[in-house]
């Protein structure tokens, strides 16, 4: 060990407080980066493993009824390697302890064996016995929410007939990773179930014996998917198939893929911001830290130690701190990553999951920190070694102080000498003052950016459930129903308002771009539903033409006044050319909106409806639910309040889990920044402050100079931080933009206040620590080695 | 004495500093010869340019004008690499404020230099020469000013420099401690034959030197040779 190595170790020990703060800051940034990125990669990997092991289909088609012989024709198609047919049915359930109507999507599995595709992972219990027709498997989400176990029974009404289902097992499947009621946005596990029933029993109940209404296909890669699907459509069209689709048409897959994609943008943007902020601060802090060793550098130079050696010495100092941060960050990141991956796997009910931390994630984290630390050292050491040693050993020549503008105006006469010193110190080096304020501001900004997602999702939900959907209950019909169904609903007890809506699956085309979604027709002057923009303002649905979600219009390259082709995927499958009469910057979904009369006119089907929105008397709810359960045409009932609650529970458990960790990291970083800013200021000003003490200033007066500066820097930092935080939030929201939902840049004043308060509290704690140091200044030793 | 080798030779040496908004002409044309083994004192009031001259002689700084030669080597206009090598091989410094590295012990402060020197004394030997054998593992903060200054002297001479430059070595010390430090310098000069140059504003110290140069306002205004060098113990101020 050379003497310089020893100096290194002792310096690290002497600077332990600051070193730990810097390492913590780097560590938190690296942890956020490594944790998010590895979670993203792990989920992607888990998804593909799960899909492979449980043979998730590549394509899907639904139809009214196709005889089983058709399956052989489909399998003969070039490019189709495997197929599996099944029967699917909507049913209403009677769930013990749940007042609201519960519904189930029942899909068939072959009697006594696993399906070829979309296999069921048996979490608990056994497969149904082929000799007992109504033995079923229940999806884990529903089973958990209702505490169901093998051996329980579940009464269900299928096509108007009541059956008693016997639960033999709890299962999961790749096509229902995200178990959400068709048409809903959020899972409602208490009131919506996926069930697997045996093919023969379900086929008979659905009047589909010897036939199927769903088919899943595995495709071989040599034939383009589009070509295969077109051939499938030609075969299935006579059986009432609105069109087959790839994995993108599987809602569960789409949600999961979108979520993973979002996670990627989360994994890049927010931790990227953290890492960038850490790099900036590392640079600033290191420059100042090495700056305080200016005289030692001068002495070492005078002794003939080469610049290179001195530079390397400081590089090691920084390197050790950064390396400690990296080790901490990678460890913490991996730990967080495993936790997050497990949380996501649980949320998406993926029985197969794996955590992986790939080397490139580590390498990039190391590289970014090394570059940031290296730059900090380089600028600091270069400045120090570039001075002739004689000058470096002297304190820097007295800085040029000028009377500030405020002073020339005479305002300063109001200040105490200490106040004047604070003011002049800050205005003497405006760049440094600003840089320090920016550093502390970044601490505020990352807190704002970290907490912003809570506000944004909250705003999105308030917008959706408070303004866009003002109904209490949304009823969906099994198939499009005549307007009489709406009349029947209106006559039900407790229904105050009932408004019908019509939803048609369509493929929008503009040039070579296309998008599969739906057009929803809303009654003019609807009281219960409206289209709202990003800020919650209603957007009028035009009497003619189609109103598009802005994200969809952008995707298709359309603007108001353009024409869009809409190919309807049901009934007679008409193709329309519609004028785009408006664009709504909605937060949720990507769809088309039309006025209900205009849509009915185009469909020319006598004004059939897909469902209805209801406003209900609170007291009459229970009775209404009972009535709805008995109405055969009702496929699904969504109680908005319950959906909102389910979502809030989800948020509490899930989002809080991941975002809270990020906010925790941000808080630690903030503490590190403020602590370093104060400590370096103290190191730079030690002699000056000690001189003041010698001149007879009290401890309180002397610390008030240093802390006054810190206070002014923090005060400057708060508005800067809020502004930068808003920018970061904007960046994050920008990265979130996708087909399914977007984030509005909504930051509640409380979030700003909380972020600022956190930094102020940290600053106060730090101020106390620094104050203690000022109190302990050794006057004699500080002064005796100085002119 | 004149037959001895010339170690350092300066002609018309000048140095101007820009301090904040003013130009300070610290040195205005100094001629100087330092011979092998001699001890020279530079006297003068503060601001006379003594420290500036010493910094130039030691390669801590470069002159704005004039020539400076160490044996066959030109030091004026030399680059940093050359100056570093010059300082590393040939020059030992003692500063008024010791400039010890606070995080290193006495022994380690000396080792800092012996590790990069070609034929150094052992740190223990160097510290023995200045009478600090019992303080080797103390940190600067645990020693008195005089002890710290003697560590600085040990550090300066441990590499067996040809030139020992001392800038106000007793400036921060009381008379008793100051004498101990001067004795250490005197001993090094006599025993190792190191050419020594002491800066001081204390005229009495000049008595222990072979020659005394007096500076004022950046120029040498007086030169005097002592017939006999006084022992540090005889000096009084």
Image (cartoon, helix red, strand yellow):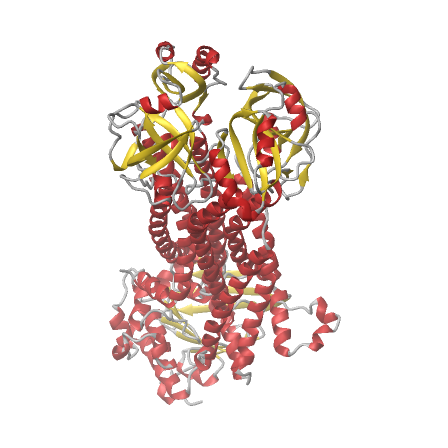
Q: Is residue A651 above or below residue B163?
A: above
Along the line of sight, which residue is nearer the eye, A163 or A106?
A163
Q: Quadrant of the C terminus of chain B?
A: bottom left
Q: Position of residue A460 (x, y in %)?
A: 56, 44
In the figure, A730 relative to A302: above or below? Answer: above
Q: Is residue B158 above or below residue A486?
A: below
User: As drawn, which residue projects farthest toward the right?
Assistant: A409
Q: In the image, what residue occupies the spot 57% across and 64% down?
A: A714
Residue at image point 33% right, 50% down = A335
Residue B226 or A622: which is nearer the viewer? A622
- Where is residue A85, by image quadrant? top left
Residue A165 shows up from this direction: yes
Q: For the point 56% across and 14% down, which residue is it?
A: A572
Quarter of the image holding residue B146? bottom left
| Front residue of this view, candidates A756 and A678 | A756
Q: Nearer the viewer, residue A257 or A174?
A: A174
Q: How many marks?
A: 0
Query: Which of the image's four quarters has the N terminus of chain B?
Result: bottom left
Q: Is residue A446 left or right of residue B106?
A: right
Q: Position of residue A453 (x, y in %)?
A: 52, 48
Residue A548 screen position, x and y as percent:
63, 30
Residue A71 image point, x, y percent:
36, 13
Residue B231 image-quadrant placement: bottom left
The answer to whether A542 is drawn above or below residue B202 in the figure is above
Q: Is residue A183 left or right of residue B139?
A: right
Q: Is residue B20 visible to us here?
A: no
């Amino acid at each position: 060990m050379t003497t310089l190595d020893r100096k290194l170790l002792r310096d690290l020990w002497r600077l332990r407080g600051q070193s730990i703060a810097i390492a913590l800051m780097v560590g938190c940034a690296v942890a956020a980066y490594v944790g998010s990125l590895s979670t993203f990669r792990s989920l992607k990997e888990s998804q593909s493993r799960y899909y492979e092991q449980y043979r998730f289909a590549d394509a899907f088609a639904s139809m009214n009824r196709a005889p089983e012989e058709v399956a052989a024709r489909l399998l003969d198609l070039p490019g189709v390697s495997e197929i599996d047919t099944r029967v699917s049915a909507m049913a209403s359930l009677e769930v013990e302890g749940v007042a609201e109507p519960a519904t189930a999507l029942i899909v068939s599995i072959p009697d006594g064996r696993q399906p070829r595709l979309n296999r069921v992972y048996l979490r608990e219990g056994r497969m149904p016995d082929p000799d007992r027709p109504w033995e079923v498997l229940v999806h884990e989400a529903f089973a958990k929410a209702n505490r169901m176990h093998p051996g329980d029974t579940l009464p269900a009404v299928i096509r108007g007939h009541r059956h008693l289902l016997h639960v033999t097992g709890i299962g999961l499947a790749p096509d229902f990773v995200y178990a959400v009621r068709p048409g809903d946005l959020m899972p409602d596990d208490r009131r919506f179930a996926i069930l697997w029933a045996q093919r023969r029993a379900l086929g008979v109940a659905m009047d589909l014996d010897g036939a199927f209404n769903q088919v899943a296909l595995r495709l071989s890669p040599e034939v383009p998917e589009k070509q295969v699907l077109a051939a499938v459509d030609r075969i299935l069209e006579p059986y009432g198939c609105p069109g087959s689709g790839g994995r993108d048409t599987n809602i569960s897959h789409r949600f999961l893929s979108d979520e993973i994609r979002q996670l990627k943008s989360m994994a890049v943007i927010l931790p990227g911001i953290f890492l960038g902020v850490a790099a900036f601060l590392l640079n600033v802090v290191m420059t100042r830290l090495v700056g305080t060793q200016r005289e030692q550098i001068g002495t070492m130079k005078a002794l003939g130690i080469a610049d290179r050696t001195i530079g390397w010495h400081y590089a090691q100092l920084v390197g050790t701190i950064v390396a400690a941060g990296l080790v901490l960050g990678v460890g913490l990141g991996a730990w967080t990553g495993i936790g997050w991956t497990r949380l996501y796997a649980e949320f998406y009910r993926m029985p197969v999951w794996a955590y992986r931390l790939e080397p490139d994630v580590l390498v990039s984290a190391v590289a970014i920190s090394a570059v940031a630390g290296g730059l900090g050292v380089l600028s600091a050491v270069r400045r120090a070694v570039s001075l002739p040693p004689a000058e470096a050993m002297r304190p820097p020549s007295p800085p040029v102080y000028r009377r500030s503008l405020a002073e020339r105006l005479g305002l300063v006469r109001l200040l105490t000498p200490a106040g004047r010193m604070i003011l002049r110190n800050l205005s003497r080096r405006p760049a440094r003052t600003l840089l320090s304020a920016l550093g502390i501001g970044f601490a505020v900004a990352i807190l704002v950016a970290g907490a912003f997602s809570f506000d944004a999702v909250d705003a999105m939900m308030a917008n959706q459930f408070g303004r866009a959907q003002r109904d209490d209950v949304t009823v969906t019909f099994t198939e499009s129903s005549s307007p009489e169904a709406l009349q029947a609903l209106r006559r039900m007890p407790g229904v105050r308002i009932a408004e019908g809506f019509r939803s048609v699956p369509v493929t929008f085309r503009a040039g070579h771009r296309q998008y599969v979604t739906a057009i929803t027709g809303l009654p003019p002057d609807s009281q219960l539903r409206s289209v709202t923009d990003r800020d919650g303002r209603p957007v009028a649905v035009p009497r003619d033409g189609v109103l598009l979600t802005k994200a969809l219009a952008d995707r298709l390259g359309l603007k108001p006044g353009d024409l869009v082709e809409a190919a309807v995927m049901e009934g007679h499958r008409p193709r329309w050319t519609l004028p785009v009469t408006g664009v709504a910057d909605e937060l949720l979904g990507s769809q088309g909106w039309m006025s209900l009369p205009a849509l009915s006119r185009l469909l020319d089907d006598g004004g059939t409806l897909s469902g209805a929105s209801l406003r209900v008397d609170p007291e009459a709810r229970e009775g209404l639910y009972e009535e709805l359960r008995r109405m055969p045409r009702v496929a699904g009932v969504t109680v908005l309040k319950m959906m909102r609650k389910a979502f809030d529970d989800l948020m509490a458990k899930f989002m809080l889990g991941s975002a809270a960790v990020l906010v925790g990291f941000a808080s630690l970083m903030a503490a590190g920044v403020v602590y370093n800013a104060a400590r370096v200021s103290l190191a730079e000003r030690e002699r000056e402050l000690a001189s003041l003490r010698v001149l007879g200033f009290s401890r309180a007066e002397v610390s008030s100079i240093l802390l006054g500066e810190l206070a002014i820097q923090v005060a400057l930092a708060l508005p800067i931080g809020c502004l930068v935080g808003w920018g970061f939030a904007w960046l994050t929201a920008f990265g979130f933009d996708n087909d399914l939902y977007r984030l509005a840049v909504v930051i509640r004043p409380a979030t700003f206040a909380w972020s600022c308060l956190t930094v102020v509290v940290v600053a106060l704690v730090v101020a106390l620590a620094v104050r203690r140091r000022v109190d302990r200044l050794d006057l004699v030793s500080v002064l005796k080695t100085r002119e | 004495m004149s037959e001895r080798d010339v170690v350092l030779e300066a002609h018309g040496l000048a140095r101007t500093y820009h301090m904040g908004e003013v130009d300070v002409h610290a040195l205005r044309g100094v001629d100087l010869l330092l011979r092998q083994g001699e001890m020279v004192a530079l006297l003068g009031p503060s601001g006379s340019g003594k420290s500036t001259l010493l910094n130039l002689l030691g390669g801590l700084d470069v002159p704005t004008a004039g020539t400076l030669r160490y044996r066959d080597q030109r030091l004026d206009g030399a680059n940093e690499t050359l100056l570093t090598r010059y300082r590393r091989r040939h020059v030992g410094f003692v500063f008024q404020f010791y400039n010890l590295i606070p995080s290193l012990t006495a022994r380690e402060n000396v080792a800092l230099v012996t590790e990069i020197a070609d034929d150094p004394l052992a740190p223990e030997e160097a510290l023995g020469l200045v009478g600090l054998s019992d303080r080797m593992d103390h940190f600067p903060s645990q020693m008195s000013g005089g002890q710290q200054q003697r560590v600085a002297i040990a550090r300066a001479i441990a590499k067996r420099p040809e030139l020992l430059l001392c800038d106000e070595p007793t400036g921060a010390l009381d008379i008793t401690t100051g004498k101990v430090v001067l004795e250490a310098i005197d001993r090094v000069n006599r025993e190792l034959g190191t050419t020594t140059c002491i800066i001081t504003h204390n005229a009495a110290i000049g008595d222990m030197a072979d020659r005394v140069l007096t500076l004022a306002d950046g120029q040498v205004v007086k030169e005097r040779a002592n017939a006999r060098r006084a022992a540090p113990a005889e000096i009084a101020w």
